[in-house]
Image (cartoon, rainbow, N blue to C red):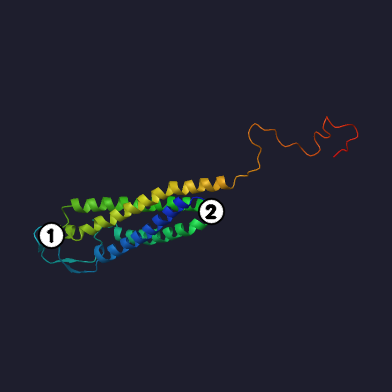
Amino acid sequence: MVPAGKGPAALIAFFGLTCIALSITIIVLIAEELYPGSGYYQVYYPATNSYSPVFYIDGACLMTNNSVNVCRYGYAVGAIGALSSIVLLVAMCAPPFITVLMSIFNSIWYLAFAITATVYNNNIEGDMSIPQNIRMYNEKYRRDVYALAWTCFAVSFVSLPLALAIKKKEAQHYEPEDKPMAGTAPYPAPGAGYPPASQPAGYPTV
């Protein structure tokens, strides 16, 4: 089924593809930069063009300052978000209410992670009990991850009114067109009003 609104449908499809790409990017950034294996690392300081002393990381998630593993949460958000965005694209050929539901799900899904990642990043940057080297190690990528999550939330949220507009147009498209217009007399029932008063006697009955 082709959606009634081609313009809104094209935007929703574009937003869906955007979320797929950004979700994969979130997974890659966490895996490569924020959830490293155990080993020795250094921090580069661009302002002074120098490196920190070598320090050891035991493979902990660098997106949290407590026992909550925000990195694994990010993996789940990226994987399920990409899958739900694929479903959103497929839903363009289904009844419009499915597109509405998927837009609502994506908005809530990405919003929850965007808030979580932002709060934990602020906690890490303000937690003086964490060694400076670890606090600063790949802090740029922490910010990138929550920025990508906010972007996915924004495009998913914008998709919702577009999906509702498609649903409304679809409903109008299938409204019956043979209803009597306002102010006109309804169609006479079969056999009612016959024969007309102007017809001579003997007019055959219906």
Identify the residue shown where x is 18% and y is 57%. Answer: 135
Residue that appears at 60% across and 45% down: 175
- Vertically, is 204 above or below 128? above
Q: Locate residue 72 relative to residue 182 in the image: left or right.
A: left
The C terminus is located in which quarter? top right
The image quadrant that residue 54 belongs to is bottom left
Pointer 1 and pointer 2: residues touching (CB < 8 Å)? Answer: no
Disc 2 target residue: 95
Residue 86 shown left or right of residue 130 in the figure = right
Q: Can see residue 113?
A: no
Q: Where is residue 201 in the image (x, y as percent from the top left)?
A: 90, 32
Asked whether residue 199 appears in the rendered view, the answer is yes
Q: Which residue is drawn at 72% across and 37% down?
A: 187
**Quarter that holds the N terminus:** bottom right
Binning the other alpha carbons within 10 Å of mark 1 as few (below 14), some (14 to 19) or many (20 upward) gives few
Which residue type does callout 2 highlight? Pro
Whether residue 138 sits left or right of residue 108 in the image: it is left
Residue behind mark 1:
46
Task: Report which quarter residue 52 is drawn in.
Answer: bottom left
Q: Nearer the viewer, residue 114 or 120?
A: 114
Is residue 166 placed above or below 39 in the rendered structure?
A: above
Question: Residue 129's spot in the image, x, y percent?
Answer: 16, 54
Q: Which amino acid does label 1 sit on?
A: Pro
Q: Secondary structure under badge 2?
A: loop
